[in-house]
Image (spheres, rainbow, N blue to C red):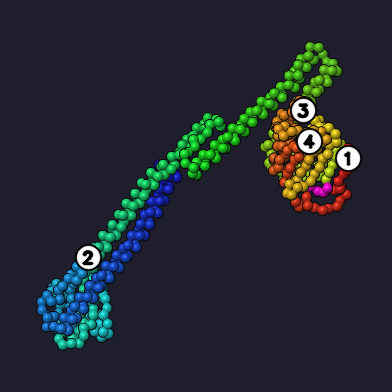
Amino acid sequence: MTLRSLRARSILAASIAILLALVVVGAGVDLLVARHLHRSLDDSLRSRAADIARLSASAPALLTTPGALDAPGGGTQLVAEVFDRHARIVARSVALGGRVIAVQSGAHRVIESGRARFLNVSLASEHFRVYVAPLSEFRGPASGGAVVVAASTEELGDTLNSVRLFTLLAALAGAGAAAAALALLMGRALAPLGRLTQAAAEIGRTGDARRRLPAPESDDEIGRLASTLNGMLGALERSRDAERRFLADASHELRTPLTALVGNVGYLRRHGASDELVAELEADTARLARLTDDLLAISREEAAAPPDEVVRLDELARRVDGVVVLAAGPVGVRGDPAALERALRNLVENAHRHGRGRITVSAETDGDRALLTVEDEGNGLDGEDAERAFGRFWRGRDSGPGSGLGLAIVRATAERHGGKAYAVGSRFTIELPALRAISESTGTRREDEPEKGRQ
């Protein structure tokens, strides 16, 4: 597992986040514990100073008794010194031995101000917390002086160091445990994704779009991803099947004129040319050319980029001969003029070939849609045939001349323009997004007036 994998990056990020969180919590705990220990030590010093002050006031003679100032306070060994009003030592703890708590200047200020204060001093490389408090003016040698109570902070520092070490070890252990738990959870969570990856790689290797990815049991993001990818594979399979059918149909359609052409050429070689044979050759060649042109046209429509020219559908309708044109005003779309004109002519040719009576071409807008419609007076198509009519190589029940690609080209053109093509009875419509700035224009040029009865 490298750091490039999602699992490794997630575990590393979570471990670092948990470690930082525990370090922050540990720092807070260290601060609270240190404050509590220092406050407890200060309370012990203050309480011992009060005891010595009471002793000085009630029994001043006992101050100079050896060991009178030695007493533990709050579990900590406290040492004390008593100064007279001139800051001279009159009594001291035996535990000090030959050492002296160097706070004469602090004692002077306390005696002069009458206010107690805390100090931090060092004594023979050992740190002490010191409390200096004034003594009341009673009888005795320390009257009007000061009492100094001190305690080493080494034990307190050792306690805080132990707390910090424990916090650091706990943070590291917590981060390690979190990393292990996350690795286990990520392994289980990403296992379906790993199976999807292997299945997708196998599908890519074989190129078999009929295969599907294994669907996870849980309906989560990975399950939805598998469903989406399986839907994409289904669409690819349908597209490939449609392509195969198209190639098969195109081969079949091309075989008929080619077979006839080969037969006629062979007859021409054996028996020579005749007017009837030349006419058949011309018909076969023309049919083959039309089929090739239609195949090329539908291929280009499906592969071409979206068009961006402004096209007037009402003007396209007026270019068609032999029809009645209904266009009350300008109808604009963004499209490919040549492709739209070819689609319109395919609809008109389809009406001439399979319909009857008068043919009407209309261009109009319906909300934000532009409609280009070709209608004749025949019965048209029913619901099922109306849908199949726009398929490739469909000729209907009365199989007549033509390649069966005319309406397929119309549908491909409409879809490339962001619209659709459909039929209702004998009414065939191309529906496209309208350009409202043009379609809503109220220009009154003569050429924009509808033509009536044009045959």
Residue 328: mark: none
Asked if labels 3 and 2 touch by Cβ distance under 8 angstroms, the answer is no
How far, Cα to Cα, is label 2 from label 1? 113 Å
**3 or 4: mark nearer the eye:** 4
Element class at badge 1: loop
At label 1, the amino acid type is Arg
| Count of numbered marks | 4
Amino acid carrying label 3: it is: Gly
Residue holding disc 2 = 155
- Which of disc 1 and disc 2 is earlier in sequence? 2
Quote the CA–CA distance across marks 3 and 4. Answer: 19 Å
* The magenta segment: 328-332
The label number, if any, that marks residue 454 in the structure image: 1
Taking the spot 35% from the left edge, 57% from the top edge, the residue there is 22
Q: Where does label 4 land, which residue?
A: 426
Residue at left offset 62%, top offset 30%: 241
Q: Quadrant of residue 250?
A: top right
Closer to the eye: label 4 or 2:
4
Q: Classify the position of the C terminus by image quarter.
A: top right
* Residue 347 appears in the rendering: no
Coordinates of residue 451 in the picture (x, y in percent): 87, 44
Residue 402: which disc?
3
Q: Earlier in the sequence, mark 1 or mark 3?
A: 3
Closer to the camera, 95 or 363?
363
Question: Is residue 101 shown left or right of residue 252?
Answer: left
C-alpha span from label 1 to label 3: 27 Å
The N terminus sits in image quarter: top left
Residue visible at 67% across and 29% down?
246
